[in-house]
Every structure is written in structure tokens, then in C-alpha cells.
């Protein structure tokens, strides 16, 4: 082994007692202090003082390598790497021993046992760093174009902001037109004027601007299928779905006039008033018709070509096929919006059972001059004018039952007030009652709330129990008025449900495609609710609008502008530094067998010279290629076999359980055990690996040779983007190792990690670390 | 959340229920009949005691004694090797589930109960934390039947076409532990699915579907008027929906409807042409059980003779 005699500086953090209360720092320092180490300790190494101590001593003692014993590397490794970098060392010359989450917090053993574990963890890292080689950072220029996913008001505004700042922007929209939900709502509320304004009058010019902007490539009927690469250089695969009408379309409408098939109109909430070939609505952008392929007679195998016959520009193309387009962009904004809560999940309100129970969005369409009743207020059952309207708030919001959502949807109090005001202004004789839990007219909206009261809207504080239908189709809302504590039965001709905003199916799908974290409510989670409200868990990917949380248009626009600004700032950085811990090939050892081309992520290829080449933008350093290479020509920088052997030698003591944990989910799950105050015995030693595919026979032999009781490999789950491809390969590797080693006494184990189930991992670690060693 | 794939058919302790034994013994004989026919591995223990839910909801027993008695019953289930405690009564289900959750999650309660056991020399009853799981070890017979609904439908011997059936899912099943209801707890469909698989014409929704039966434990006696008003309202809704048969999953609801229907008819001056049975009785009947000897319909207050004749 290439152990140098250079001095290793070891810095131990007390973490204000989080470590020093359960680890005897004095004994730890003594045990680590050898001829080629110098040991320091500090109350908080992550503080400025702590970092200065590290920098000062690197200079004073001419340290070439550093080990830090502190919290999990997931927390401060980046900070400490920058710290040693500032002091003139290559960041690869730093190792962090996790003596908090995986030591002081995770064991209920006595102080001697915990201290002994801390000693072995630090010793392992000292051995490891002695085998480290400097890694040069990989710098890649940032692609200066952006992708915005979702063409609702958030995506439109973000795309226009980017385009106006000179950024070439692709706007991908799944539907035939941009506009989203904002196009449907008819009127918007304004706190200053106490008036309702025309939504389309504000939206339509923006939509046209998108369609005409030289910096925007609009892709409608398109869906993002796959995203690879990393911040600064994403490769995006987009499916452009066939719309069966080509760009020749002049939107004259002859085709729609002759089409014999009526279909459900999504724009009018499912009313059957649309033709199988149509424009979504008059102001649609692009102004290109499209055919509903599931309803069109021709496309479902029948004989009909009426639209083709009347089209004068030859725009109808029944043979059009889906098209796959590859885009290269530097950054991505997810603006995939919301879905309405499905009110039929609460049958007590009769939605879907009774014709005259509608949602606020459906009422908005009834009010729309381009809606099913051309703007006339009418009950769906018989198109008569309702005399009594009751609105029910918080349907699916502020709801502890698993049917609904716990959060407040933020827009619905104002939407109800808007519609109540519209009714009262246009039809003063119609009674409007709003049943609410709390009216939340935050900020300046309070004025609007008061104005609605002045118009004569009634308010009943109580969440209705049930809506029932009388034989004449009129309705009764049963509610307890909690202010008078009386049960009331309010008669109504029309009941309007203010349903929750939920993360749209598109949002959930795109989060998976982009590999960004969702919050527990299903919306894309921001990095920091106050300081980084539009950054996601992945660099270079931003979020805005209702994809991030429920909000109204005002808040959406504030966020989409910010997302555009953050995107511009990221692009103007010019270049990006990539994680150097990826696959490296030693061409002097490579015999060109091509086995490594089996890379599940397609990161490895043969270049024009017949040499193996690794794409640093695609390689995530999983390590699978290292087991494929018989020549040992490929290794993961920072995770070479020498380094791992050295760490095993350092950490392992007789009777230990040695656990190899993949570096993302599996390692984080182990950290969660400590931070959730669950425990497992201190004779469990964890080694972080890119994925367990890099574990070799000789590593396990080394472990058993040193007296390990058992070896466990914990792999990323299959719903993780790396685990998705690697899990089965890791399982194969485990089975192969078991076979090769004969697995004496069933001592080699494999487990799938799952972050919420840290208790499961703790119990596995506990069982295996206490198991009798069989022969 | 519980899902249908997780419903076991092995290691079932069919939990005896006071209101079944004393009021409708046919529910238990129907359950065992149906389990036998469906190949469910179950056990009925004579060592088991009442869940004490009636006493608890009458404010006669406190939570600690109730939990201690549950711990005793849990020890029997584990000792016999039938750890999946399955109730015919929604109150037994909810009481046992809550007791298990307390024993697992509340150290003070567990320690106190265990020390009482030890002092009394009942060491074999001591409850070890997490030895049962409040979700994975507690079921209601309706869940077992739901998991076998297709098979029940295939073995069905009665012609239910044109029979209007409505479900009354019991409050203590879907309103107390609503996170552990299979499907939507605001629109439970367990009974409906089983009835539909036997070809019944199931009423999807009726007014007051989620309203209580009106029993309210002590309310039935101390607030008799309110209690009967609620039951009357429900019977009216069921009548308006043209229901012939109401299916229950709780003997207490069944008492409220079946025993009090004649009382309400008299006191409210009305007439109802609807009959009641427990889901176990329904499943047993569908599988060909004898209506008297197995289902025990003779113990009902609302006679089922006309209804049963209609099925033939």
C-alpha cells in the first residue's frame, strides 16, 4: 500500500457536547496520536473559529492531509473541503469521520464502547486519507439556455422573463395550448379596486408574446420524458405528441364546423360542447387545431375525412407520428401547476351524484362568456337561474382525514368571495351563503372581504356535514353554525365547493423525472422556505407557482419572476464545477474489452481512437463499471480499492459488524437512526461506498480475516434514480459474492434502504451485530 | 395505511364479543361457518375475556383497566399462536387497537400494567413492547371477507338480483382509527363490495349514510328520545332509498336497528319494510348456511321470513 509518511492532521469536534458528552475526547485524542498524526480538538469545528483553527494548523504544521471527526459528511463535508482548499490543500486530502450521527447519537452502550468506536472510525479515515490522491475539479461550461416545464401562468411568466433577459428558453406544455388554469377562471380579484378583472385580458397578450418571442421555442402537445446530465448541462428528451394537424393550420375553423363528433371539453370542465378537431379556446397559443385521437372516427379505424376535405391548406395529417426531440439546456424551471381536489372523494357533498353541486372552477366556467352557458348564471340540471347559492369552503383542505389535505389551499377564500361578489353585483336578488371554518383574507384582501359583506353575502361559520338532494333537484346543506351552536339546514339551488389545490399529476411525475424532492404533501420542495424559496433539492433546477405549494396568481407571479432571476444568475456564472468522485479509466491498464460499456447510465463509450471515454456529465460514480473490469483499469476517484481496504483495516475490530452503505439514501437512513435517537450496538462499523456494486470478494475476505462477525450491504431503493438502475445489479453482485465465498454460516447480508424506515435498518444492524457467529 | 393485500387469512383469533354471544349468537356461528368454507385459519378461545368496551363507553371502566384486560387478551392470542386479533364488533376492534397503541407507545401505562401483572403472579401476561402491532395485528371480520370477496361471489348460492342492499359501516371502525380504513374512510365500501360481489343491487349513497346508528352506548338509555330520533332519521333515509336489507358490521348497531325498529314503528307511527343482518350472517347465508341453525335469524326482532322467502 502506498502509505506516505506525511503528517495527517486530525481535528475532533465536540459539537457542544453532542459528541463530547458520549465520547471521551481525551482518550480519543490519545489513541489517535501516533508518530504520523497530530491531533487537535475544538468546541465547534464548523464555526469560523473552528475553521480558522484548521487553516492555521495546516499552515503551521505543514499538514498535507486532514481528517475531521465531526457530524455526518452529508452536513458539513462541503464546508470542510472548502476550508482545506482555502488553506492550499487539494479537497481530496480531506476525510470526515462520522462520529455524531453514526456514533455519539446512535449508541446506548457505555462511554468506553462509544469512544472505542469513535477511535476506530477516525483511525479508518486516517488510513484512508493516507491512500488518497489529489483530484482535480472538473470544470464544465454552463449551457446558456433554459427549459421551462409547464405553460400555465407561472411557466409563461418565467419564460418571458428569461427570454427578455436574453436567455434562449424552451417552453414545454403537455396540452395543445398554453394558458393553464388561469385561462379558465374568467375573472381575477384585485384587492385595490375591489373589482373583478378579466383574466383573459391580462393573460392573452402574454400568451401571444410567448408565441412570437424570438428567444422562446414553444413546444405544445409535448412532454418531458427523461432528463440526464447535471446542473449546467442537462440533456432532455421531449416527446412531441402527434396532434394530426401540421403548422400550415390557419385556425379558420372549417374543420371543426364539419366534424360530426362531440367530445368532452376539458376547458369547460368536461361539458360535451367541443368537436374532436378543435382549438382549446379562441385565444389558444399556438393557433393550431388538434385532433382528439381517441374520439376521431378516422383515427379510431372508421371512415371519415370531412376535416381533411374542407381544409384549404392541407393541414390535416392523419399519419402524423409522435416525435422525440433532444434538448440541451443549462437549467430547468418546473412550473407544472396543480390539479383540483376530486370532490367525489367526499360523497357527503354530493359532487358527481347531484347535478347542481359544482366546484368554484366550474362556476368560473359558468360565468365565462366563452363558457358552457355563455356567461349566464344557471343550474346545470335545467339551466334555470339559481335563487340560493351556498358555497362550502375547505373541501379537501385543512382536513385531517386521509381523504383530504392538511394544508390550507390559500386561494379558495378569495375565490369564493370573488364569485360571491360577481353574483351579487350581477344578480342582487340571489342569496349567497358561504360556509367557512375561518375566512382567510390575508393582507390587503381584507378590504375585499369587507366589500363582499357590504354586498349582502351571508357567512356561516361551520363545516357542513352533508348536502342532500330533494326530489325537485334542489339541495339542502346541513351545517352546524358554530357561532350560534345550532344545526341548520340551508336550502340551495346551487352548491359550490371550494376544493383544495393538490400537486398535479404532472408535478409528481416531473419531480420523479427531474429527481427533485417532494414535500410530504406532494408539492416540489423548496431548498429553504425563507431564503431559497424557488431552489429545489437539485442544483440548476428551480420551481415556481403551484408546483411548489398552493397559491394565487399574485404569489405565483412573484415566484416565477424570482425563478427566472435565479436561473439567469446561475447561467451568468459561466461554468460549473462537477463532483470529481466519478469513474476514471487508466488507459495503460485497459485492454479495450468493452465490458464497462454495460454502464446502466450510458456514461461510458468508446471514442474515435478506440479508447474508453467517460462522460463526466452523465457519470454519477455508482461504481458498477469497476466490478465489470477484470483489468482493474476503472476506479471511482476517492473510492479506490486501496482506499476502501485501508479504511476497513482502520475501523475493523474482532466481533464487529461491517456494513457497506451506498452514499445517498442508505447512508442518510443510517444518519437518521442517530438523529432520531434510535440506537444499535457500537460494534457496527459503517463504510460509505458509491453503491454496494463496488464491494469485492477481497474486501469481504479482509473483513472476515480481521474477525468480522458479519458483513452487510445496504443499497439505494429502486425508487431512487441511481437505485432504479443499480439495485438489481447490486443484488446480483451480492449473490455472486455469496456464491464465491461460500458464505460460511450465513454471514453476508443484503438490505434495501428506505429513508423513513430508519427503525428497520436499526433493527437489522442490532440483530446482525449481536448474532452468534456460525462456522 | 392498511391495504387489501395485507389482510391475512392465517393466525386469526376470532375475538368473542359480548353483544354477539348475548344478543345474536348467529353472528359468531356464521363467522366460523364462513371461515371454514373460505379456508381461513382461525381460533376461538374460551380463555378470552370481553374487551370491556361497553363498560368503558358507559364510563364504568377507565382506560387503564381496559388496557390491562386487553393486554391479558393479547397474551392469550400470542400464546395460542393466533396473533391476528379479528373482531365481529367494531367496538372490540377499536378498543383493542387503541389498547395496543397505548401499550406500545406509552411507557408509563405499559410499566404500570406489567408491574400489576407481576405483583399478582401473572408473569405470563406481561406485555413486551411492540410484540403486537396496532395496525398489522388488528382486523375486523369484514376485512377478511373483503379480501375474499371474489371467492364469496363465486360460491354464492342465493339470488340477490333486485334486492336493494345498503351498508351501515360502524362508527368505531371508520371514524376512530380512520387512518387504518381500507379505502376512503369518508366513503367506506367494504360491505358494499362484498354485497355487490354476491349480485346484490347496492345503494351507492343515501342521505345520512355516515350518521351514527343512534345507540351511543349509555345514550340509548339516558337520552332515549334523542337516540331514537337519530335511528328514526336513518330508517327514514333507508326507506326513501328503497332499501330491503341493511348490512351491519357491529352487533351494537344491529341491536339499535333490529331491536328498536318495532319500537320506532310504534312510537313514530310508521312502518318499515326492511330487515337487518350482520355481514358475517350475510356471507354465511350466501355460502349456503342454514338461516336458523347457523345464521340464527330467529334471535332477530324484525322477522326475516318474508325476506328469505323472496330469495328462493
Image (cartoon, coloured by chain):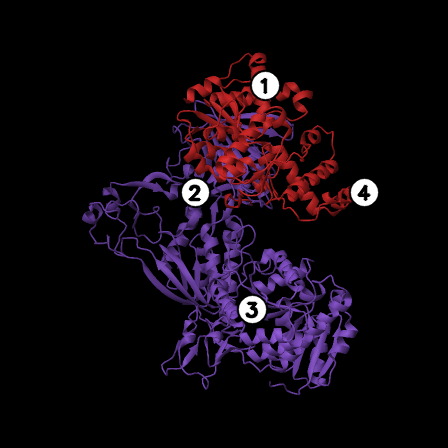
- The residue sitting at 48% across, 53% down in the picture is A508
Q: Is disc 2 placed on a helix, strand or loop?
A: loop
- The residue sitting at 76% across, 70% down in the picture is A43
Cα distance between the residues tagged 2 and 4: 73 Å
Cα distance between the residues tagged 4 and 3: 48 Å
Neighbor class of circle 1 (other Cα within 10 Å; few <14, some 14-19, many 20+) is some
Q: Residue A743 — which label? A: 3
Q: Position of residue B288 (x, y in %)?
A: 45, 28
Shade representing chain A = purple
- Position of residue B25 in the picture relative to residue B306 (left or right): right
Question: Chain in red?
Answer: B
To which residue does mark 2 refer? A186
Q: Residue B260 — which label? A: 1
- Position of residue A682 in the picture relative to residue A744 (left or right): right
Cα distance between the residues tagged 4 and 1: 46 Å
Neighbor class of circle 2 (other Cα within 10 Å; few <14, some 14-19, many 20+) is many
Q: Position of residue A376 (x, y in %)?
A: 40, 33
Confirm whether circles 4 and 1 share one chain: yes
Name the residue furthest right.
Answer: B119
- Position of residue A443 in the picture relative to residue B120 (left or right): left
To which residue does mark 4 refer? B119
Q: Are marks 1 and 3 in contact (CB under 8 Å)?
A: no
Q: Can see residue B188?
A: no
Name the residue furthest left.
Answer: A309
Cα distance between the residues tagged 2 and 1: 54 Å
Amino acid at each position: 500500500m502506498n502509505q506516505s509518511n506525511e503528517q495527517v492532521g486530525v481535528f475532533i469536534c465536540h459539537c457542544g457536547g453532542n459528541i463530547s458528552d458520549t465520547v471521551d475526547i481525551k482518550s480519543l485524542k490519545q489513541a489517535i496520536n501516533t508518530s504520523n498524526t497530530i491531533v487537535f480538538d475544538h468546541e465547534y469545528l464548523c464555526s469560523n473559529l473552528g475553521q480558522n483553527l484548521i487553516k492555521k494548523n495546516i499552515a503551521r504544521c505543514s499538514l498535507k492531509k486532514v481528517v475531521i471527526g465531526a457530524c455526518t459528511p452529508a452536513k458539513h463535508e462541503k464546508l470542510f473541503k472548502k476550508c482545506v482548499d482555502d488553506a492550499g490543500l487539494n479537497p481530496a486530502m480531506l476525510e470526515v469521520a462520522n462520529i455524531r450521527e453514526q456514533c455519539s447519537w446512535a449508541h446506548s452502550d457505555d462511554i468506553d464502547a462509544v469512544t472505542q468506536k469513535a477511535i476506530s472510525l477516525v483511525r479508518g479515515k486516517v488510513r484512508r486519507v493516507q491512500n488518497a490522491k489529489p483530484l482535480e475539479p472538473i470544470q464544465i461550461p454552463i449551457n446558456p439556455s433554459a427549459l421551462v416545464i409547464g405553460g400555465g401562468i407561472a411557466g409563461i411568466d418565467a419564460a418571458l422573463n428569461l427570454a427578455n433577459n436574453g436567455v434562449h428558453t424552451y417552453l414545454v406544455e403537455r396540452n395543445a395550448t398554453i394558458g393553464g388554469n388561469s385561462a379558465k377562471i374568467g375573472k381575477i380579484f384585485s384587492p385595490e379596486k375591489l373589482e373583478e378583472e378579466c383574466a383573459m385580458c391580462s393573460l392573452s397578450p402574454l400568451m401571444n408574446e410567448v408565441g412570437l418571442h424570438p428567444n422562446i421555442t414553444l413546444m405544445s402537445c409535448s412532454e418531458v420524458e427523461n432528463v440526464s446530465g447535471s446542473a449546467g448541462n442537462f440533456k432532455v428528451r421531449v416527446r412531441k405528441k402527434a396532434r394530426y394537424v401540421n403548422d400550415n393550420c390557419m385556425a379558420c375553423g372549417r374543420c371543426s364546423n364539419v366534424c360530426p363528433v362531440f367530445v368532452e371539453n376539458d376547458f369547460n370542465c368536461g361539458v360535451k360542447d367541443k368537436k374532436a378537431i378543435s382549438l382549446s379556446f379562441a385565444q389558444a397559443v399556438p393557433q393550431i387545431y388538434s385532433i382528439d385521437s381517441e374520439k376521431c372516427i378516422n383515427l379510431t379505424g372508421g371512415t371519415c375525412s370531412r376535416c381533411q376535405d374542407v381544409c384549404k391548406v392541407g393541414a390535416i395529417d392523419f399519419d402524423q407520428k409522435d416525435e422525440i426531440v433532444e434538448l440541451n439546456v443549462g437549467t430547468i424551471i418546473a412550473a407544472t401547476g396543480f390539479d383540483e381536489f376530486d370532490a367525489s372523494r367526499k360523497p357527503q357533498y354530493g359532487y358527481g351524484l347531484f347535478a347542481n353541486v359544482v366546484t368554484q372552477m366550474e362556476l368560473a366556467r359558468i360565468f365565462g362568456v366563452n363558457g358552457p352557458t355563455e356567461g349566464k348564471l344557471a343550474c346545470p340540471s335545467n339551466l334555470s337561474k339559481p335563487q340560493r347559492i351556498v358555497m362550502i369552503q375547505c373541501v379537501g383542505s385543512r382536513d385531517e382525514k386521509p381523504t383530504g389535505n392538511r394544508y390550507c389551499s390559500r386561494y379558495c377564500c378569495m375565490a369564493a368571495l370573488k364569485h360571491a361578489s360577481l353574483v351579487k353585483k350581477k344578480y342582487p336578488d340571489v342569496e349567497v351563503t358561504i360556509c367557512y371554518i375561518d375566512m382567510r383574507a390575508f393582507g390587503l384582501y381584507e378590504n375585499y372581504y369587507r366589500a363582499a359583506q357590504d354586498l349582502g353575502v351571508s357567512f356561516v361559520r361551520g363545516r357542513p356535514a352533508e348536502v342532500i338532494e330533494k326530489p325537485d333537484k334542489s339541495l339542502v346543506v346541513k351545517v352546524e353554525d358554530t357561532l350560534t351552536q345550532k344545526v341548520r339546514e340551508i336550502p340551495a339551488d346551487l352548491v359550490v365547493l371550494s376544493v383544495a389545490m393538490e400537486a398535479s399529476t404532472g408535478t409528481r411525475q416531473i419531480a420523479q423525472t427531474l429527481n427533485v424532492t417532494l414535500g410530504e404533501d406532494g408539492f416540489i420542495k423548496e431548498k429553504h422556505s425563507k431564503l431559497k424559496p424557488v431552489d429545489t433539492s437539485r442544483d440548476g433546477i428551480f420551481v415556481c407557482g403551484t408546483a411548489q405549494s398552493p397559491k394565487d396568481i399574485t404569489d405565483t407571479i412573484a415566484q416565477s419572476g424570482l425563478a427566472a432571476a435565479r436561473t439567469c444568475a446561475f447561467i451568468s456564472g459561466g461554468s460549473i464545477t462537477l463532483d470529481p468522485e466519478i469513474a476514471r479509466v487508466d488507459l495503460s491498464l485497459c485492454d479495450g474489452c468493452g465490458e464497462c460499456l454495460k454502464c446502466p447510465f450510458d456514461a461510458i463509450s468508446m471514442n474515435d481512437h478506440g479508447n474508453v471515454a467517460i462522460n463526466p456529465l452523465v457519470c454519477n460514480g455508482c461504481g458498477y463499471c469497476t466490478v465489470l473490469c477484470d483489468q482493474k483499469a476503472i476506479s471511482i476517484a476517492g473510492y479506490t480499492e486501496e482506499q476502501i481496504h485501508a479504511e476497513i483495516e482502520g475501523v475493523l475490530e474482532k466481533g464487529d459488524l461491517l456494513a457497506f452503505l451506498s452514499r445517498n439514501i442508505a447512508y442518510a437512513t443510517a444518519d437518521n437512526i442517530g438523529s432520531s435517537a434510535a440506537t444499535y450496538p457500537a460494534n457496527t462499523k459503517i463504510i460509505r461506498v458509491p453503491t454496494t456494486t463496488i464491494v469485492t470478494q477481497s474486501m469481504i475476505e479482509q473483513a472476515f480475516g480481521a474477525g468480522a462477525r458479519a458483513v452487510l450491504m445496504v443499497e439505494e431503493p429502486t425508487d431512487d434514480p441511481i437505485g432504479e438502475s443499480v439495485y438489481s445489479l447490486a443484488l446480483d453482485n451480492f449473490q455472486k459474492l455469496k456464491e464465491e465465498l461460500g458464505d460460511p454460516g450465513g454471514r453476508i447480508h443484503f438490505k434495501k434502504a428506505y429513508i423513513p424506515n430508519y427503525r428497520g435498518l436499526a433493527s437489522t444492524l442490532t440483530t446482525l451485530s449481536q448474532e452468534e457467529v456460525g462456522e | 395505511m392498511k391495504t387489501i393485500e395485507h389482510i391475512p387469512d392465517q393466525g386469526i383469533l376470532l375475538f368473542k364479543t359480548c353483544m354477539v354471544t348475548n344478543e345474536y349468537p348467529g353472528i359468531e356461528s356464521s363467522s366460523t361457518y364462513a371461515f371454514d368454507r373460505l379456508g381461513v385459519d382461525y381460533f376461538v378461545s374460551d380463555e378470552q375475556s370481553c374487551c370491556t368496551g361497553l363498560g368503558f363507553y358507559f364510563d364504568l371502566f377507565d382506560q387503564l383497566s381496559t388496557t390491562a384486560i386487553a393486554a391479558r387478551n393479547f397474551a392469550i392470542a400470542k400464546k395460542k399462536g393466533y396473533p391476528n386479533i379479528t373482531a365481529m364488533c367494531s367496538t372490540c376492534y377499536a378498543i383493542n387497537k387503541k389498547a395496543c397503541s397505548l401499550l406500545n407507545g406509552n411507557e408509563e401505562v405499559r410499566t404500570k400494567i406489567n408491574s400489576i401483572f407481576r405483583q399478582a403472579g401473572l408473569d405470563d401476561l406481561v406485555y413486551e413492547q411492540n410484540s403486537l402491532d396496532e395496525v398489522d395485528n388488528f382486523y375486523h371480520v369484514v376485512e377478511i371477507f373483503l379480501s375474499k370477496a371474489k371467492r364469496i361471489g363465486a360460491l354464492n348460492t342465493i339470488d340477490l338480483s333486485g334486492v336493494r342492499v345498503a351498508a351501515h359501516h360502524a362508527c368505531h371502525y371508520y371514524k376512530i382509527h380512520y387512518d387504518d380504513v381500507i379505502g376512503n374512510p369518508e366513503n367506506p365500501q367494504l360491505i358494499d363490495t362484498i354485497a355487490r360481489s354476491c349480485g346484490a343491487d347496492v345503494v351507492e349513497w343515501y342521505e345520512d349514510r355516515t350518521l351514527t346508528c343512534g345507540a351511543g352506548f349509555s345514550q340509548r338509555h339516558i337520552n332515549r328520545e334523542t337516540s331514537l330520533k337519530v335511528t328514526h332519521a336513518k330508517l327514514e333515509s333507508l326507506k326513501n332509498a328503497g332499501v330491503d336489507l341493511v348490512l351491519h358490521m357491529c352487533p351494537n348497531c344491529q341491536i339499535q336497528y333490529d331491536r328498536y325498529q318495532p319500537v320506532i314503528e310504534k312510537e313514530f307511527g310508521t312502518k318499515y319494510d326492511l330487515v337487518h343482518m350482520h355481514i358475517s350472517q350475510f356471507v354465511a347465508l350466501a355460502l349456503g348456511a342454514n338461516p336458523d341453525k347457523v345464521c340464527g335469524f330467529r334471535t332477530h326482532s324484525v322477522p326475516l321470513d318474508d325476506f328469505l322467502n323472496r330469495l328462493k
